[in-house]
Image: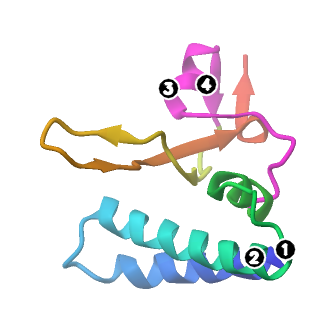
Amino acid sequence: MTRTVYQEAIASRNANTQNNELSKMQQYRLQLKSITSKLREMAQTSGRTDVSGNQLLRECYQLTNSELDTFEGWQAKGGTVRKGQHAYLFWGKQVRSNKGYSYFPVEFLFSREQVLFA
């Protein structure tokens, strides 16, 4: 069910890569918004209204039982992300700007299965 949403998001990422008008981060945000909105729709139709966007993303990526961390986080733990691995996109904690607005940044996380420990 959610696997097709993920595959569609990858296709969307590839299409957005060709769009030079948007920065790379804007493309990632659009992709993540698209995935999240589709997953929320699917969750609501199945009666799951109490699930967070990041929890739905974990299920979509099939990472419900996997430890996740940033590239720098794995390095601090003594690990190295394997060559060729791609980060999973998640929403970060809300950031409030001193200019009066707030936003949710995009987080790039790697699962434990993508990391090598020496």
Closer to the N terminus: mark 4 or mark 1? 1
Disc 4: which residue: 74
Of circles 3 and 1, the one toward us is 1
From this view, report whether residue 69 is shown above or below residue 53.
above
Tag 3 secondary structure: helix
Towards the viewer: 52 or 62:
52
Few, some or many residues within 10 Å of mark 2 (<14, 14–19, 20+): few
Closer to the N terminus: mark 3 or mark 2? 2
Residue drawn at 36 percent across, 69 percent down? 27
Mark 1 is on which residue type? Gly
Instruction: Report the disc number at residue 44.
Output: 2
Of circles 4 and 2, the one toward us is 2
Tell whether position 66 is magenta: yes
Mark 2 is on which residue type? Gln
Closer to the N terminus: mark 4 or mark 2? 2
Find residue 78 and report its horizontal and vertical position in percent. Answer: 64, 14
Of circles 3 and 2, the one toward us is 2
Few, some or many residues within 10 Å of mark 3 (<14, 14–19, 20+): few
Mark 3 is on which residue type? Glu
Towards the viewer: 50 or 7:
50
Disc 3: which residue: 72
Tag 2 secondary structure: helix
Residue drawn at 57 percent across, 50 percent down? 87
Query: What whole-number distance in Å separates the C-alpha atoms at marks 4 and 1?
Result: 36 Å
**Pointer 4 with pointer 2, Cβ within 8 A:** no
Based on the displayed image, in which of its 4 quarters is residue 57 positioned?
A: bottom right
Query: What whole-number distance in Å separates the C-alpha atoms at marks 3 and 2?
Result: 35 Å
Tag 1 secondary structure: loop
Q: Which residues are magenta?
A: 61-81
Tell whether position 112 is magenta: no
